[in-house]
Amino acid sequence: MIGNHFSLILLPTNKCNVACEYCFEDKTDDFMSLEQLSVVTDKVLDHMERKAIATLTIYWQGGEVMLLSPHWFARAYELIDKAAAARGKQVRHSLQSNMIGYSHKWNQIIVDMFGNSVGTSMDFPNLYRRAKGRTPEEYTTLWARNVRAAREAGIEVGVISIPNKETLRLGAERFYSYFVDELQLTDFQVNTSFSGGEATVAKRESLLDLDGLSQFFVDLARVWVTRGYEQGVKLGPFDELMNQFSGDPACLPCIWRQNCADEFVSIDALGHVAQCDCWVTSYPEYWFGNIFDDVSFTELLQKSKARRKFQARPEKLMQHETCAGCDYLSVCHGGCPVRTYAITGQFFVKDPYCQVYKALFSTMEELATGVAAARSLHITKEKRWEEVVQRR
Amino acid sequence: MTAVVYHIPLHLAALYRGKKIIVRVHDPAELIKALSDSDCENLIGVQLLSLTMDAEALADWGYAVPVELAMRRPAEEFPLLYRHAKLLDKHPVRVSIPVTSGFSKSVKVASSLRFSIKLAVNQPDPTVVEELREVLAFYLRHPSVSQPVEYFHSTLLSFYHHDPITLWDIQEEDPAVLRYITDDGKETVARQFNASVSSVIGDLGSFVTDLKSELLADGGECASCEFFAHCGGYFKWPRRDFVCDGVKTVFHALRAAAGELEHDLAAFPRSRTGTLR
């Protein structure tokens, strides 16, 4: 927030075109108008000037962003670009969509505004993603068709996936094979589930046995190192952990940053400001305020009691949890507040996925060491990764 | 010849105008209010004496001036370091950690937040030497450590390059180079955690040279110490009767690690001639 870069997760609509059973968002039918976007842009740029922040990344999410038109985005792009240029600021844009509403009409704006790249989501197997009155299989078919079309148009597609009970049963090899061999994706990411919002059967089911989930992550790390790492397959967050434990520059996901309150905020279509998309759509009691109120964005953030809780969280964890003595403190800092709150109902306790993270961290540390050792042991390129993995 | 740097309390800033200064202050907001742009031209660094104060004002201060966070009670204060992590976006930041019982938690947290660290080691109590050795092992071996931990880091490099630098230089405590100005305006040695800080008698410009000569002439522990070139009698001040057995084990470990590093790096080119890219 007071660094040289500012990240904004912007939800230009709270509406969605599908009805995934485990979705954490309390959706509404609201859209942000271009006039409202202009107010948001000016207030954010004012804040950047006050805090001497040079660059901004806007992560466009929903709801579902493709419920707005490519034309709306073209005008939004022009509006933001012009306002930022007048202040000497740089703005980058990133797009996250479920791709259900994708058509070739989106191609040009994805090139112009989003660097020809889009992020989407899919699980394997898909148990909970579906359109109203349709099956998960129908959803998967439509999604896969649209993703294929986008890739054929030259768009880079990255996928976020959340393991479910069936994922664990089928195992890491099958999971990896689905994304890399069947879908031929080279960029995907695995997240742990977040069960915010109204309780449902799917949300209860999505909280997996931690031993099983840990084993899945460990197995997946080994599959990736054996089959994908050298071939350029990006698998988040494993790839960044590999960088981290190899001593290379790493960009770890927000759940493991020292304090997400220093990094970004989210604004929804009604102007509510909160820590991230999860908080803004699930927990009104944790809103920082509303950007359309008669107050500067800087003041809104400074005066927010809710935000102060986020800022204080790592400090409290160091006082009351075992984090300060953990070997992996530098890559975790107590984990994600929203996962913690959604699962435990408490704020100032460490992330309940601690066990899973530790299993992954120690595995990636071993694998990174093994990779370095393999290099010094003169193992042939073809054999190197297999031996590294088998030795563990 | 390098100009002497003065480590001053904020209220004496006017007296040292035009000189190189490090300003120590409890509240960053006071500093920003008090210093003019021309004062900042000679500002070498800022030392924050309180970790409970809001550092946001300093984070927004556009001078990218080096900041030192001075801890007093490292066994208790380590959670407070999180409040200051954001300073790194705009300033080089170092945490000064007194080597007292329980200080290792502060080292681990500071390191995990990617702060540089200076161990204010002074004359360590024998009961904390084991903890000091554990921290050394952490610095040498733990993969998360990405920033220097002084005095270990410069001493290790000094052994590696076979180019002795004394702890007086590494710890920035040679008054010929850096002079500590007490709150009542007296010039002394920059060991601000030591009660006898104002007890220096004689010429501060030759303080370290004089001390070294005296220690060697005494024929005591320093006269036969294999690490004297790396220490410079640092651990024999202010109490000459300090027994160095514990701190020597740290020097031994650092010298061994430098040798190991030298060996590994010498072997590295040979390993790169194999089949790997």
Image: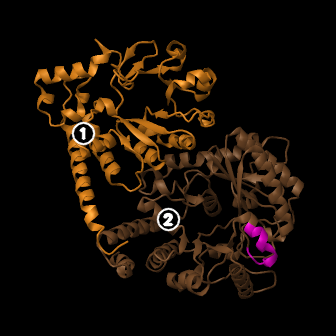
Name the kind of residue labelled 1 in the image.
Asp
| Magenta-drawn stretch contains A238 | no
| A48 horizontally vs A344: left or right | right
Residue B251 placed where, x, y %?
22, 41
Q: Colour of chain B?
A: orange
Image quarter of the C terminus of chain A: bottom left
Viewer-nearest residue: A251 or A377: A377
| Magenta-drawn stretch contains A99 | yes
Viewer-nearest residue: A48 or B27: A48
Residue B242 placed where, x, y %?
21, 28
Residue B11 placed where, x, y %?
54, 16
Q: Which residue is identified by label 1?
A: B163
The secondary element bearing badge 2 is classed as helix
| Chain identity for the colour brown used in the image | A
Do marks 2 and 1 share a subunit? no
Looking at the image, can residue B276 be seen? yes
Q: Residue at x 26, y 40 (%)?
A: B129
Query: Pointer 2 and pointer 1: residues touching (CB < 8 Å)?
Result: no
Q: Chain of mark 1?
A: B
Q: Which residue is identified by label 2?
A: A357
Q: Nearer the viewer, mark 2 or mark 1?
A: 1
Extent of the magenta region: A98-111
Q: Answer above or below: position of B274 versus A134.
A: above
Q: Answer above or below: position of A94 versus A348.
A: below
